[in-house]
Amino acid sequence: MPQPLPKIRLHLDAALSEGAEVSLSRDQANYLGAVMRLGPGARLLVFNGRDGEWLAEAVTLTKRAGQLTLFERTRPPAPPPDLWLLFAPVKKARTDFIVEKACELGCRRVLPVLTELTNSERVNTERLQAHMVEAAEQCGLVWVPEMAEPIKLTAALDDWPPERRLLFCNERGGVPAAEALSTAEPSPWAIITGPEGGFSEAEAARLAGLPGALSVSLGPRILRADTAAVAALTLWQAIHGDWR
Ligand code: SAM
């Protein structure tokens, strides 16, 4: 009877291969040694989006340092569907929530866009990327979505890849999102949600006019930005993504 795989998963940027000896950072050793109370001989899964997921064993492990040795690969790299989430940053806790849910729900790239009414211009992408790594470890991803640097919405649209369709969550109303998505062809997609203050008239017109864009309603109520992001990601995954 094969051994059940360990539950603990750790993202490592190092090259992962059979027999590799990988050193842990101080934070990783502290997480495994102090928080998870593991010691030498403990087994865990380590992964990254390049080399896949591997069964590993702690050769040495204290609260400050550790060394792992790798056995066999348990899963190949598995990128989520080709979906981007563009979101206007909102208050810190809600932005953290949006980024964490984008990772869990399945998204390949997360791009903060600065719109006319965005009032949280400061976005700590390093901290948000760390949030995504934690979410990837927890939800079983063999991948970590890319956390892009914030850019102005106008710049993102000026440089929009023509093959990528945009699901514009339009608080002023639009086609019901599920209806719009279920009649649309599969292709690379992006979802965009606005800030607490919503999109300006000019932004809404430009977004709705983007070739291939769908201007959709997420129902008769005005959702908070984080609720809208989760709702749109859920709909897209259920209709076009890897939930089927
Ligand atoms: N201040 C805006 C208003 O009162 O109309 C609300 C903005 S809402 C807090 C933030 C973002 O969530 C919107 O820009 C939109 O992208 C999305 N959103 C919220 N409710 C929505 C709905 N019913 N349909 C489509 N998108 C919605």
Image (spheres, rainbow, N blue to C red):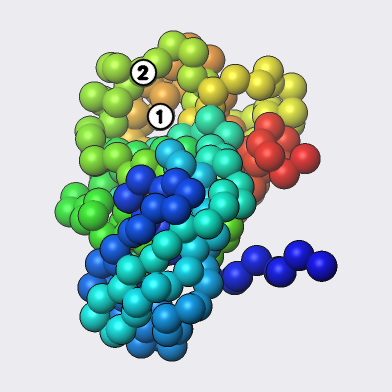
Is residue 97 visible to us here? no
Q: Nearer the viewer, mark 1 or mark 2?
A: 2
Q: Say left or right for 64 vs 51.
A: left
Mark 2 belongs to which amino acid? Trp
Against 142, residue 168 (above or below) is above
Residue sitting at 25 percent across and 67 percent down? 25
For mark 1, give the secondary structure.
helix
The answer to whether residue 131 of the structure is visible from this angle is yes
Residue placed most toward the observer, 128 or 215: 128
Q: Where is residue 205, by image quadrant? A: top left
Secondary structure of residue under mark 2 = loop
Mark 1 and mark 2 in contact? Answer it, CB < 8 Å: no
| Image height of 52 relative to 215, above or below | below
Q: Report the amino acid beneath label 1.
A: Ala
Pinpoint residue 186: horizontal percent, then vertical percent.
Answer: 66, 21
Return the residue found at the far right: 1
Q: Quadrant of the C terminus?
A: top right
Tell me where residue 140 sits by quadrant: bottom right
Asked whether 105 or 66 is in front, the reply is 66
Q: Which residue is mark 2?
A: 160
Pointer 1: what residue?
Answer: 204
Identify which residue, 52 or 217, lies in the foreground: 52
72 horizontally vs 69: left or right: right
Return the x and y of residue 227 as percentages of the image width and height. Answer: 53, 57
